[in-house]
Image (cartoon, rainbow, N blue to C red):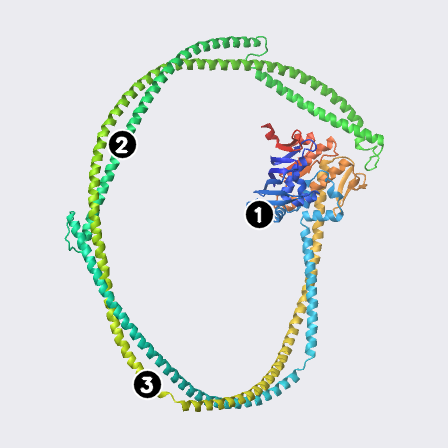
Amino acid sequence: MRFDRLTVEGYRCFEDADVRFEPGVTVVRGVNGAGKSSLLEACFFALYGAAALRTANATLEDVITTDAERCTVELWFTHAGGEYRVRRELKRSQDRASQDVAVLETPEGRIDGARAVDDRIASLFRMDAESFLACAYVRQGEVNKLVEASPDERQDIIDGLVRLGVLETYRDRASQARLGVKHVRDSVAGALEDVTDQLEDRSEEDLQAAREQVGTQLNEIGERIDELRGDREAAAGRKEKAEATIETQEEARAELADAREKVADLEETIEETEASRGDLKGKLEEIDERIERAKRETKEALEKAATEGVDIAAGAERAAIEEAHTAVEEGIEDAEGEINTTELRVEQAREQRAELEEEAEALDGRAEKRERQAQDLDEDREAAKAEVEETRAEIESIDERIAGAKKYFEDAPIGFGEAESLRSEAEGEREDVSEELTSVTSELKATRTAIERAEDLREAGKCPTCGQDVEDSPHVHSLDEDREQVAELEGRREELREQVEGIDERIERAEDLREVETTVGMLQDKREAKEEVLEGRTETIADKKDQANRYREEASEAREEAEAKRAEREELLEEVEEYESDLETLRERRAGLEERGALLETAIDAEERRSDLETERTQLEERHEHLGELLDERREGLEERRSRLMDLEERVEEERVAEAKKTKRKCEERIEAIDEDLEAAETRRDGFQNQRGRIESELDRFEDLRERREDLEERAAALRSLYEECEELQGMYADLRADLRQRNIAALERLVNEVFDLAYRNDAYDRITLDGEYRATVHEKSGATLAPGKLSGGERVLFNLALRCGIYQLLVEGTQGTAPMPPLILDEPTAHLDAGHIERIDGVVSRMREIGVEQTIVVSHTDELIDAADHRIEVTQRAATNRSEAHAESDLLV
C-alpha cells in the first residue's frame, strides 16, 4: 500500500499545497516550524478524520488556517492494486468547526458520510487511528509512547494489531451466551416447579362427576324449551294468516288509489299530446315558406352567373353547380400561380439590376486599389535597394570580429572547438575529488564527536543515564586510535582541498575559452542570418516589380468588366417593364373569376339551406304522424284503466279487515307470554352450559399442564447440556488466545532483536526479551538485565524504533500478503542520535523495504538520511508570512 498524492487547502499553515509521493524512501525536509509534521498529519487526518486530531490533542477548529472559513484535505492512495481517493472538508461556523464532507472513492463505488468512510478505512488497513499510531506512524516526540504505555494499554494495542482482540471478543460473547443460557435454565426450572404444583392441586375424578351432573340438568331444560317453541310457532301461524288478510285489503286500497291517480294522469297526457300535434302543424307550414325562398335565391344567383359567362342553366342541379364552382376555383388558382410567377420574375430582374450595379462599383473600387498598390510597390522597391547596400556592409564588419576572436586560441593548449571537452574532463575530476573530500569530512566529524563523548564519559567516570562504570566501555577503550585517525584524516583533507583549487583554475580557463567559442558561434550565426536577409531582400526587389505590373493589368481588366456590367443592367430594365404589363392583365382576369365564384357560392349555400329544410320537414311530418298514433293508443289505455278502477272498488271489504285485526292482537298477547317463559328457560340452560364449559376447560387445562411439564423437563435437560458447552467454548477461546500470544511474543522478540542488532551493534548488550505482557528487558553481555527506560537517550530511541519495526514486520509476516501494509511514517526519528547511529537508521529503513514496506516517509534534518533517500520533499515558508509551501524535489528542479 502506498500514498500517491496529497492536496490541502486551508490546513494549518498551508493555504494550498499539492504533493506527490513515490514508492521507496521519501524524506521531508525544511527549517524548524516550516510545517513538515503538519504535512504528515494531513495524510493521517485524510484517512481517520476527527479521530486523528483527538489523539493529537487538537480540535477541528485548530487545523483550519487562521482567517479561513473552510479546509479541504484530499489523499490519493493505492491499496491491494486498487486506486482510492479520500476527501474531507471542514467548515467553520461561528465559534466551532464541523466536518462538512467525507467521501471515499473506491474501485467498487463511492462511499459518503464520515462514519461510513471511517469504518471503510479501518476495514481496509485492519487498524483504527490508535493502532495506526502504534504501528505505522511514529510522530515527533512519541517514539517512546509504546514502551511508556501501561502493561494493559500496550497489551491491548499489540493484541489488537495482530487480531488477538477478536478472540477476546469471542470469549466475551461465549461468556455472555453462558450467562444467558443460565438465566433461561433457571427460568425453565422455576416454570417446571410451578406446573408440578398446579397438577398436584387438581382432582380429575371430581371434575368428571361434576360434568355428568350438569349434563342431566341440560337435557331436562332442553325438553321444556322445545315444548314452548312449539306453542309459539302455532300462535305465530294464526297471527300470520290475520296479517295476510289485513295486507291483502291494504294492497287493494293502495291499488285503488293508484288506479285513480293513473287515470287522471293519462287524461292530462292526452290533452298535452293533442296540443303538441297542433304546434307541429304550424311549424310545417313555416318550413314550406322557407324552402320556396331558398329556391328563388338559387335561381337568381345562377341567372347572374350565366350573364357573367358561366356555362350553367337557371334550374341546374346542385352537383352541376358545384362542378362549375370547382372549375372557377381552378381558374383562380391558375391565375394566382401566373401572377406569383410574374411577380417573382419582376423581383428577380430588379435584384439582378441592383447586383450588376454593385458589381460594377466593386470592380471600379478594385481597379483603384490595384493602381494604389502598384504605386506603393514602386516606392518600397526603391527603399529595399538602400537596405541591401547596408546589409552588405554589416556582413563585412562581422567577418572582421570573427577573425579577431579566433586569435585567443593561438597560445592555448587546445584548438578551437575543444573547450567543452576540456571543461567536462576537469569537472569530472573535481567531482571525484569532492566526493572523497566530503567522505573524509563526514568521517572526521563523526570521529571527533565520538572522541568528545568518550572524553566526557571518562571525565565523569560513570554513564549519566544508567550509572554504570565507563572505564571498560567500548566508547572509551578506542580513544587513542580515534585520535590517530583524526590526524590522518586532517592531512588527507588538506591534500584534497589543494587538488580542488588546482582543478578550479583549469575549469575557469576552460570556461573563458568556451565563452570565446560561444561568441564566435553567435557571430557566425549572425553572419548567416545577414546573408539570408541580403538574399531575401534582393529577391523581394524583383518580386515587387513583377507584382506592380500584375496589379496594373488587373486594374485595367476590372474597369472593362465594370462597363460591361452597366450595359447588361440597362437591358434588364426593358424586361422589367414587359413583366409589369403582363401582371396587370393577370390581375384583371383573377378579379372576374372571383366574382363568378362568389355567385356560385351563393347558389350552393341556398341549395344547402333548402336541403336542410326539406330534411327537417320530413322529420316533423314523421313526428306529427307518430303523435297521432300515440293519441290513439293512449285513448285505448284510458278505457282499460277506467274498467280496472271499477273492479278494484268492488274488491275492498271493511268487515274482514276488522275481524283480522282482532285475531292478530290475541296472537301477539299469547306469543309475548310464551317468550317470557322461553327466555327464563334459555337463561337456565345457558347457565348450565357455561358451568359445563368451565368444567371442560379445567379438564383441558389439566391435560395441557401435563404436556407442558413433559416439555419443560425435556427443555431443562437440553439447557443443562448447552450451559456445559458454553463453559467449554469460553475456556477454549481463552486458551487459544494465550497460546497465540505466546507465539506472537516469540516471533516479535526475534524480529525486535534482529532490528535492534542492525541499528545498534556494540559489545555491551546481548539480547532483548519480552514477557507475556509485552514488557521488554535488555540483557547485557555481562548477564545483567536493564529496563528500556534505563537506556541512554539515543539508545532508547533505537530500542523503540526496533520495537515499532518489529511489530510492523510481525504484521507483514502474519497477513502473508493478504493485507498490504500502510506506509511507515517516521517524524524526526534521529533526535538524540549521534552521527554513527544515524547511519544505522538508514539500514533499518532498508530492512523494512526488504520485508515488503513499499513506501517509507521520514521527516529529518540529517544529511545522511536526506542523501540516502530515493525522493525528497522540500517544505518552505513564504517570506514575511507564516504560510508554508511544499514541493517535490523534481518540481523544484523544473
Residue 318 in sight from this viewpoint = no
The Cα–Cα distance between marks 1 and 2, rounded to whole angstroms, is 73 Å
Residue type beneath disc 3: Met
Residue type beneath disc 2: Arg
Quarter occupied by residue 15:
top right
Residue topped by disc 1: 111
Q: Are marks 1 and 2 in contact (CB under 8 Å)?
A: no
Residue type beneath disc 1: Ile
Q: Nearer the viewer, mark 1 or mark 2?
A: 2
Residue 442 in sight from this viewpoint = yes
Identify the residue at image location x=45%, y=13%. 531
The answer to which of marks 1 and 2 sits earlier in the sequence is 1
Q: Nearer the viewer, mark 3 or mark 2?
A: 3
The Cα–Cα distance between marks 1 and 3, rounded to whole angstroms, is 96 Å
Residue topped by disc 2: 350
How would you rate the neighbour count of disc 2 (Cα within 10 Å): few for under 14, some for 14-19, many for 20 or more?
A: some
How would you rate the neighbour count of disc 1 (Cα within 10 Å): few for under 14, some for 14-19, many for 20 or more?
A: some
Q: Secondary structure at mark 3?
A: helix
- Provide residue 598's location: percent of width, then percent of height: 22, 49
